[in-house]
Image (cartoon, rainbow, N blue to C red):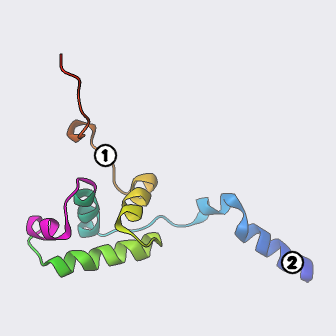
Amino acid sequence: MKTQQSLDTSVEDAPGNAMFTPPVQLTAKETQALEWCLKGKTSWEIARIQSCSESTINFHFSNIRRKFAVRSRNAAVFKALKSGAITVDPSQSRDIHEPD
């Protein structure tokens, strides 16, 4: 019996176990908020874009941080990019281009 508990614990702690966790399910508004945040918009600006209040946007970010189990908006954006929940559009990149 002790052996079974040890095996269960080691399986849960295994690095490959992360593949079995279900993907984070974001609402359309949460996804849009993350995309605007990635583009450098503040909560106030996102609220104006989405025609809602700033507190609604902050509520969305609170849910996003909870879903990704992170403490900051930047960490949430990073995890969303890493998981594929949002993507970077290369045509709208802010890269500096060398003059011709």
- The amino acid on which the numbered mark 1 sits, given as a three-letter code, is Val
Dividing the picture into quarters, in which one does residue 76 lie? bottom left
> Which of the two discs, 1 and 2, labels the residue nearer the N terminus?
2
Instruction: State the residue at coordinates (47%, 73%).
Output: 69
- Asked if 9 appears above or below 87 in the picture, the reply is below
Q: In x, y percent, where is residue 81?
A: 39, 53
- Provide the residue designation for mark 1: 88
Dividing the picture into quarters, in which one does residue 17 lie? bottom right
- Provide the residue designation for mark 2: 4
Which is more foreground, mark 1 or mark 2?
Answer: 1
Give SS at disc 1.
loop
Q: Is residue 43 magenta?
A: yes
Q: In x, y percent, where is residue 73?
A: 35, 67
- The amino acid on which the numbered mark 2 sits, given as a three-letter code, is Gln
46 horizontally vs 7: left or right:
left
- Which span of residues is magenta-colored? 38-50
